[in-house]
Image (cartoon, grey):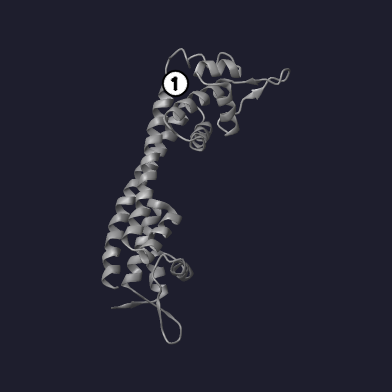
Amino acid sequence: MSTLRPADLAREHGLSTQAVRNYEQDGCIPPAERTASGYRIYTEVHAAALQTYLALIPAYGHSASGQIMNALHDAGVEGVLIAIDRGHSQLLRDRETLDTVRKAVAHLTAESPTVADLSADTRTIGELAHQLRVTPATLRNWEGAGILAPARDPSTGYRRYDASDLRDAHLADLLRRGGYPLDHIRTVIEQIRTAGGTEALAAALADWQQKLTTQGLAMLNAATHLNHYLNVHTHTL
């Protein structure tokens, strides 16, 4: 079996030799044999491990990719499959959330009596609760979770929900009925607030879709490398 130096692995992937050593220390590549003088000796097994780990990162992120490689080295195939299943499950949830948000946004921007006049005036907490058919306590709970941020009437201190608050409340209601937890809804609402107007929001959703597609394709690419490394690693045990 041919041998490689840390610099050989580093140069192939545009890394520093210290990065390669760090990946070994973190369990992303197997421990290297040492020469009598203490220098690391890598082989094609380490090269395959490093290539696999780097392919996993755009698919699952640094943390999960490290978990996958460590599971392979420590727990075998079952641990790897469990970690990968988690990643695929999260991607599916993200796709479903994107689809739900698109439908919700289409609903909120449609010419319907419930949302067409959102910019006309403001609502009290009781009026908004009645409109959504929820309790005022639910709206206060959403506010506590960071989903809503209504202004207060300076003279009375009562909550007043403006157009953007009404949009967020309608979207939160749709997502909540879809089974999404409050922290997930807060993240979606924050993304929509950041996006700005309808055109910017459409661009943000398209960008979100592209990112999910890119991640899905990265998962396919990572699977090819992982399958190769599994074969190489198994045959060297």
105 shown above or below 208:
above
Identify the image quadrant of residue 163: top right
Taking depth in this image into account, of 3 and 23 the one nearest to the observer is 23
- Name the residue at 41% across, 57% down: 65
Decide if residue 123 is in sight here: no
Look at the image and tell me in which quarter the N terminus lies: bottom left
201 shown above or below 214:
above
Q: How many marks?
A: 1
Residue 49 placement, left or right of 126 = left
Where residue 227 appears, as percent x and y from the top left, is 27, 60
Give the residue type at disc 1.
Thr
The local secondary structure at tag 1 comes to: helix
Read off the residue under disc 1.
109
Where residue 8 appears, as percent x and y from the top left, is 38, 73
Taking depth in this image into account, of 31 and 203 the one nearest to the observer is 31
Where residue 76 appears, as percent x and y from the top left, is 33, 63
Decide if residue 86 is in sight here: yes
Taking depth in this image into account, of 178 and 110 the one nearest to the observer is 178
Where residue 46 appears, as percent x and y from the top left, is 35, 70
174 shown above or below 79:
above
